[in-house]
Amino acid sequence: MFTYALDEETLLKLLAPEHVAPLFKLTNESRKTLRKWLPWVDAVTDIKHTESFVKGAMNQTAQNGGFTAGIWYRGDLAGIIGLHQIDWRNRTVSIGYWLGHRFEGKGLMTSACRALVDHALVDMNLNRVEIRCATHNEKSRAIPERLHFILEGVIREAEKLPDGYVDHVVYGMLQREWNLIR
Protein backbone atom coordinates (compact mmCIF):
# COMPACT_ATOMS: atom_id res chain seq x y z
CA MET A 1 0.00 0.00 0.00
CA PHE A 2 1.25 3.49 -0.90
CA THR A 3 2.20 5.64 2.09
CA TYR A 4 3.76 9.11 1.93
CA ALA A 5 5.04 10.98 5.00
CA LEU A 6 4.16 14.67 5.07
CA ASP A 7 6.03 15.12 8.36
CA GLU A 8 6.79 13.14 11.52
CA GLU A 9 3.12 13.05 12.55
CA THR A 10 1.22 13.01 9.25
CA LEU A 11 0.94 10.38 6.51
CA LEU A 12 -0.99 9.99 3.29
CA LYS A 13 -2.21 6.43 2.65
CA LEU A 14 -4.17 5.19 -0.34
CA LEU A 15 -7.64 4.14 0.76
CA ALA A 16 -7.92 0.42 1.42
CA PRO A 17 -10.60 -1.89 2.90
CA GLU A 18 -9.16 -1.54 6.42
CA HIS A 19 -9.94 2.20 6.28
CA VAL A 20 -13.71 1.77 5.91
CA ALA A 21 -14.53 1.79 9.64
CA PRO A 22 -12.34 4.81 10.57
CA LEU A 23 -13.63 6.70 7.52
CA PHE A 24 -17.26 6.05 8.42
CA LYS A 25 -16.54 7.12 12.00
CA LEU A 26 -14.84 10.34 10.85
CA THR A 27 -17.73 11.12 8.52
CA ASN A 28 -20.25 10.60 11.34
CA GLU A 29 -18.40 12.72 13.87
CA SER A 30 -17.95 15.55 11.34
CA ARG A 31 -21.37 15.23 9.70
CA LYS A 32 -22.67 18.60 10.90
CA THR A 33 -19.77 20.61 9.47
CA LEU A 34 -19.30 18.48 6.33
CA ARG A 35 -22.91 18.60 5.18
CA LYS A 36 -22.71 22.37 4.81
CA TRP A 37 -20.29 21.95 1.87
CA LEU A 38 -20.48 18.34 0.64
CA PRO A 39 -23.63 17.05 -1.08
CA TRP A 40 -22.98 13.34 -0.40
CA VAL A 41 -22.82 13.51 3.41
CA ASP A 42 -26.54 13.01 4.10
CA ALA A 43 -26.58 9.91 1.86
CA VAL A 44 -23.84 8.19 3.91
CA THR A 45 -26.01 6.60 6.59
CA ASP A 46 -24.52 3.11 6.75
CA ILE A 47 -21.00 1.73 6.76
CA LYS A 48 -21.85 -0.05 3.49
CA HIS A 49 -21.96 3.38 1.80
CA THR A 50 -18.41 4.07 2.94
CA GLU A 51 -17.34 0.58 1.86
CA SER A 52 -18.71 1.30 -1.62
CA PHE A 53 -16.83 4.62 -1.74
CA VAL A 54 -13.54 2.94 -0.78
CA LYS A 55 -14.06 0.22 -3.42
CA GLY A 56 -14.71 2.92 -6.02
CA ALA A 57 -11.58 4.80 -5.00
CA MET A 58 -9.51 1.63 -5.25
CA ASN A 59 -10.98 0.93 -8.68
CA GLN A 60 -10.13 4.46 -9.85
CA THR A 61 -6.53 3.89 -8.73
CA ALA A 62 -6.37 0.53 -10.51
CA GLN A 63 -7.61 2.15 -13.74
CA ASN A 64 -5.02 4.97 -13.50
CA GLY A 65 -7.79 7.56 -13.36
CA GLY A 66 -6.71 9.16 -10.10
CA PHE A 67 -6.49 8.17 -6.47
CA THR A 68 -7.90 8.94 -3.05
CA ALA A 69 -5.80 8.94 0.10
CA GLY A 70 -6.54 9.22 3.77
CA ILE A 71 -4.71 11.88 5.74
CA TRP A 72 -3.49 10.22 8.93
CA TYR A 73 -2.45 12.45 11.82
CA ARG A 74 -0.86 10.89 14.92
CA GLY A 75 -2.38 7.55 13.91
CA ASP A 76 -5.94 8.85 13.40
CA LEU A 77 -7.71 9.36 10.10
CA ALA A 78 -8.09 13.15 9.82
CA GLY A 79 -9.46 13.61 6.30
CA ILE A 80 -9.47 12.67 2.64
CA ILE A 81 -7.67 14.09 -0.38
CA GLY A 82 -7.52 12.87 -3.95
CA LEU A 83 -6.65 13.42 -7.56
CA HIS A 84 -9.93 13.02 -9.41
CA GLN A 85 -10.62 12.29 -13.04
CA ILE A 86 -7.16 12.57 -14.54
CA ASP A 87 -7.46 13.67 -18.16
CA TRP A 88 -4.33 12.09 -19.62
CA ARG A 89 -4.87 13.53 -23.09
CA ASN A 90 -4.91 17.11 -21.83
CA ARG A 91 -2.71 16.34 -18.78
CA THR A 92 -5.12 17.90 -16.29
CA VAL A 93 -6.58 16.84 -12.97
CA SER A 94 -8.72 18.21 -10.15
CA ILE A 95 -8.04 17.87 -6.44
CA GLY A 96 -10.79 17.25 -3.92
CA TYR A 97 -10.44 17.22 -0.15
CA TRP A 98 -12.18 17.37 3.21
CA LEU A 99 -11.05 17.35 6.81
CA GLY A 100 -12.73 16.14 10.00
CA HIS A 101 -13.73 19.07 12.20
CA ARG A 102 -11.41 18.19 15.11
CA PHE A 103 -8.37 18.28 12.80
CA GLU A 104 -8.92 21.77 11.42
CA GLY A 105 -6.38 24.52 11.99
CA LYS A 106 -3.29 22.27 12.07
CA GLY A 107 -2.08 22.91 8.51
CA LEU A 108 -2.79 19.30 7.55
CA MET A 109 -4.77 20.04 4.40
CA THR A 110 -2.35 22.66 3.09
CA SER A 111 0.52 20.22 3.53
CA ALA A 112 -1.39 17.35 1.92
CA CYS A 113 -2.54 19.51 -0.97
CA ARG A 114 1.00 20.81 -1.57
CA ALA A 115 2.24 17.22 -1.77
CA LEU A 116 -0.48 16.22 -4.26
CA VAL A 117 0.08 19.27 -6.46
CA ASP A 118 3.80 18.52 -6.51
CA HIS A 119 3.12 14.86 -7.31
CA ALA A 120 0.70 15.76 -10.12
CA LEU A 121 2.76 18.49 -11.77
CA VAL A 122 6.27 17.15 -11.21
CA ASP A 123 6.16 13.36 -10.78
CA MET A 124 3.19 12.69 -13.08
CA ASN A 125 4.15 15.48 -15.51
CA LEU A 126 0.60 16.82 -15.72
CA ASN A 127 0.16 20.37 -17.00
CA ARG A 128 -2.71 21.67 -14.89
CA VAL A 129 -4.27 21.14 -11.47
CA GLU A 130 -7.66 22.60 -10.64
CA ILE A 131 -9.41 23.11 -7.31
CA ARG A 132 -13.07 24.07 -7.09
CA CYS A 133 -14.96 24.96 -3.95
CA ALA A 134 -18.02 26.90 -2.85
CA THR A 135 -17.47 30.65 -2.98
CA HIS A 136 -18.41 31.05 0.70
CA ASN A 137 -16.31 28.12 1.95
CA GLU A 138 -13.47 30.27 3.26
CA LYS A 139 -11.54 27.40 4.85
CA SER A 140 -11.50 25.42 1.62
CA ARG A 141 -10.62 28.48 -0.46
CA ALA A 142 -7.69 29.27 1.82
CA ILE A 143 -5.85 26.13 0.65
CA PRO A 144 -5.33 27.04 -3.03
CA GLU A 145 -4.77 30.67 -2.05
CA ARG A 146 -1.94 29.68 0.33
CA LEU A 147 -0.43 27.59 -2.45
CA HIS A 148 -0.57 30.57 -4.88
CA PHE A 149 -3.14 29.10 -7.25
CA ILE A 150 -4.69 31.56 -9.69
CA LEU A 151 -8.36 32.41 -9.16
CA GLU A 152 -9.80 31.83 -12.62
CA GLY A 153 -13.50 32.49 -12.19
CA VAL A 154 -16.84 31.54 -10.71
CA ILE A 155 -19.28 28.90 -11.92
CA ARG A 156 -22.79 29.93 -10.92
CA GLU A 157 -25.00 27.46 -9.06
CA ALA A 158 -22.49 24.69 -9.68
CA GLU A 159 -23.60 22.39 -6.88
CA LYS A 160 -26.79 21.58 -4.99
CA LEU A 161 -26.26 21.29 -1.24
CA PRO A 162 -28.88 20.64 1.44
CA ASP A 163 -29.50 24.39 1.83
CA GLY A 164 -29.67 25.13 -1.92
CA TYR A 165 -27.34 25.83 -4.80
CA VAL A 166 -23.88 27.30 -4.31
CA ASP A 167 -21.52 28.95 -6.74
CA HIS A 168 -18.06 27.47 -7.17
CA VAL A 169 -14.84 29.39 -7.43
CA VAL A 170 -12.25 27.83 -9.75
CA TYR A 171 -8.53 27.93 -8.96
CA GLY A 172 -5.83 26.69 -11.32
CA MET A 173 -2.12 25.97 -11.23
CA LEU A 174 -0.03 25.25 -14.30
CA GLN A 175 3.12 23.15 -14.29
CA ARG A 176 5.31 26.08 -15.40
CA GLU A 177 3.90 28.27 -12.58
CA TRP A 178 4.44 25.56 -9.97
CA ASN A 179 8.02 25.05 -11.08
CA LEU A 180 8.71 28.73 -10.35
CA ILE A 181 7.27 28.73 -6.82
CA ARG A 182 7.88 25.25 -5.43
Image: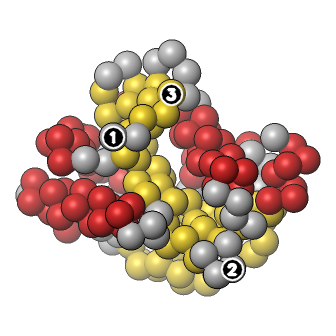
Up-down relation of residue 97 to residue 86 (above or below): above
The answer to whether the residue labelled 1 contacts the one labelled 2, judged by CB atoms less than 8 Å apart, is no
Label annotation for residue 5: 3
Q: Mark 1 points at which residue?
A: 1
Label 1 to label 3: alpha-carbon separation: 13 Å
Q: Name the residue under label 2.
A: 90
Label 1 to label 2: alpha-carbon separation: 28 Å
- Secondary structure beneath label 2: loop
The residue depicted at 17 percent of the width and 41 percent of the height is 18
Identify residue type, mark 2.
Asn
The residue depicted at 15 percent of the width and 57 percent of the height is 51
Let me know if residue 142 appears in the view.
Answer: no
The residue depicted at 74 percent of the width and 45 percent of the height is 147
Tell me which label, 3 or 2, sits earlier in the chain: 3
Decide which of 165, 108 is in the foreground and name it: 108
Specify the quadrant of the image occupied by residue 157.
bottom right
Tell me which label, 1 or 2, sits earlier in the chain: 1
Label 3 to label 2: alpha-carbon separation: 29 Å
Place of residue 92 in the rendered image (x, y in percent of width and height, measured from the top left): 65, 71
